[in-house]
Image: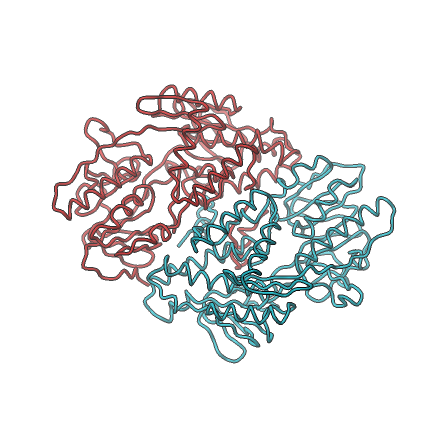
Chain colours: A cyan, B red
Amino acid sequence: MKANIPESNQERIVIIGGGFAGLTLAKKIAKLDYQVVLVDKYNFHQFQPLFYQVAMAGLEPSSIAFPYRKLFQTEKRDFYIRIAEVTGVDTEKRCLKTSLGILNYDHLVIAIGADTNFFGNENLAKHCLPMKSMGEALHIRNEILTDYEYALSTTDYEERQGYIDVVIVGGGPTGVEVAGAMAEMRKYILPKDYKELNPKEVDIYLIQSGPALLKGMSENASKSALKFLQDLDVTVQLNSRVTNVDGEFVYLKDGSKIKAKKVIWAAGIKGNTIEGLPADSLVRGNRVKVNTFSEVIGLDRVYAIGDIAYMEEGDVFPQGHPQVAQVAIQQGKNLAKNFRNIQKKKPLKAFAYKDKGSMATIGRHLAVVDLPRFKFSGGFAWFVWLFVHLFSIIGTRNKVIVFINWVWNYFTYDQSLRLIMKSKAPDTKEAKENEVV
Amino acid sequence: MKANIPESNQERIVIIGGGFAGLTLAKKIAKLDYQVVLVDKYNFHQFQPLFYQVAMAGLEPSSIAFPYRKLFQTEKRDFYIRIAEVTGVDTEKRCLKTSLGILNYDHLVIAIGADTNFFGNENLAKHCLPMKSMGEALHIRNEILTDYEYALSTTDYEERQGYIDVVIVGGGPTGVEVAGAMAEMRKYILPKDYKELNPKEVDIYLIQSGPALLKGMSENASKSALKFLQDLDVTVQLNSRVTNVDGEFVYLKDGSKIKAKKVIWAAGIKGNTIEGLPADSLVRGNRVKVNTFSEVIGLDRVYAIGDIAYMEEGDVFPQGHPQVAQVAIQQGKNLAKNFRNIQKKKPLKAFAYKDKGSMATIGRHLAVVDLPRFKFSGGFAWFVWLFVHLFSIIGTRNKVIVFINWVWNYFTYDQSLRLIMKSKAPDTKEAKENEVV
């Protein structure tokens, strides 16, 4: 087996990863005079900002995922998609090693994004639930629902606490949004679906190491988010830190412990890795160091964009950009322009990030929005959040389906997606592991 | 851990299985003066007639699945749901052994349905793809899409055939519907999503042991289905039979073989089993023999309804009823009436099946419908099929979402649900097995 891309008289650009950065780039250069190959281990683009709604059974995966082949159906030219794991790169021979075989490139764009960072702690990696892919979000949903079921059949108070309590680690947007959504599930769903459970016994903890939530956003946003979560009865512990997890208890640095089987880890990310990149092109957080043209330092015709890239932008971002969707999208666009400039033999354009603001939602009528000129929170912020996210989702059908789901949930206070669902292979062994308990 | 159902001064009816039979019964008796416990291994009702659309990426699982807890939210009385595997029954002590512990009953209703029958052939069980649960339908979807991806990177003609050809075994409604849906995917989707593949190289085989398709339906329906499938370029082999499968080839009784990794097995079902039932209450196909009141022969206060039940209905159905949804629903309703009669000390009502007809869809504007008085096929039959199925799906939101999906597909000839999607646990071993290739 080999990657099997036809020879072309055009230069070949290989893009690894179809997240916000890679997908934006691919869309923009599909019509230029290059042969383009998009490689990803999944066959669909994932809309990461709404993973938490998949995890909380508010949306289906298909509503916020879009198959690459469908996205590029209308590209009539030299454009190829390969679903493969990239295992290494040889920058001298200009080729990738993939699960489908060797893939040569003339230009390589690394847009492999970031994954959960457990900072080398094996217990955390073993017992915590990360949420950096759709599959992981689905797994969290299955675990929460399965544990509620176990809790019904558990007469021991302490044991039941282990099943129903949840600890969320990390006070960034992901942690805040998960905590808010869980609190709303407890408030609106639990009393109807699980009448036998006492919602007052269900505790939701949000552990943040720093002194404020939503680091990087305004003080107004941090304080509003804290208030909104406390109003929803989330136990927010600031200046705290998880030191260990063993599947039964969560241990904090002040010596206390919380009985909880489920720990959702949103406390750090690190760049994904590809073997073969020189060690000195990697910096803190496993990011790949690039110049302002997104060229990897020390390598020829190799670029990095999005969460994986570390670019110092003069005095504005001397420590690199935040690892958010907007940076990824804008870097994808800028690199596309530069591929056009290369062809036209024009000078390259340096990247300059334009901050459009940031936002996070906590719950119904509760969100915080920081725009460059305005900072606001509450009901209007929530509608702004809904509007911006709805229009960022790819595909008209997806927009329609998400819109219907949201309107439905808004008026009924209730979704109907609480399925414990797994794909099941016929082979007995896998079937058993995937079996619903 | 134990099942943990509160004591009640009402008699307890335990229903195992929430398919068409069990769910209909549960809904009808929820308001009677019994304590009712519904036990199922899944936390949702599955609308089996549309599994094939999930397998063919036409619908999402959540559109045709409905969580039991949501369904019974409005029941205010002595009603309990337990998600558990039932491992055995003790009809003397009147209790069930379940994965959650012992569960006592006063009345037991066995509505555990049927599973795929490989007739003891281990190779078939190992290599074929069954489609009797949502998880299995999702698995078929993942396999088909993954193999198309492999096919792109395969330069060897024979090897590629193995990835792209599909053999469907069984010419009943399931086999016919899967074959038709696959043929439409080849016709409308493949040329757009997989431009590098030649649709003419993609072969779809439907193997039927008998001389006609859709056994049990009218001759008109059989012939129309055959014609529709042949017009869609499905290779239908009547009077044929699969003798063996090894993951590479499918061997037929005439000595020929077909190169195909994917074999969808829809050629037989057998009743699911519970340990502890006396051997003489089981008949052919592992069904549980009942009298016309759905009482299991030889047992007291134990009933069986739906696909698992074998009931001889006088001269009308001397060999038992067909294992279809309508029989299950009607048996559920009749048993509910009899539970009411028991309470009112009225005589029991014998079951009498009222055949409302049957139908199968082959593709766009192509279906066959047998009503008691009319038999018709083609475009109008297709709209009848759509209408009947849409209104049989539980839940308004589900109806709306399925309707939007169908209208969308109708006008665009294209869904956007072709995601290779699996739930992913953090634990490395399972994560690896679930990893997308």
Percent x, y for residue B146?
57, 41
Q: Tell me which corner region of the image, top left, top right, bottom left or bottom right, holds residue A191.
A: bottom left
* Left or right placement of residue B232 versus residue B337 in this view: right
Quarter holding the N terminus of chain B is bottom left
Q: Tell me which corner region of the image, top left, top right, bottom left or bottom right, holds residue A279.
A: bottom right
* Left or right placement of residue B364 versus residue A390 in this view: left
Q: Is residue B370 above or below residue B130?
A: above
Q: Which residue is drawn at 28% across and 55% down?
A: B79
Q: Does residue B318 appear anywhere in the picture?
A: yes
Percent x, y for residue B371?
33, 25
Q: Is residue B74 above or below residue B116?
A: below
Q: How many marks?
A: 0
Nearer the observer, B402 or A207: B402
Q: In this view, does A60 lie above or below A232?
A: above
Q: Which residue is drawn at 34% across and 43% down?
A: B19
Residue ranking furthest to the bottom: A254
Percent x, y for residue B108?
23, 49
Nearer the observer, A363 or B28: A363
Q: Does residue B430 appear anywhere in the picture?
A: no
Percent x, y for residue A140?
49, 58
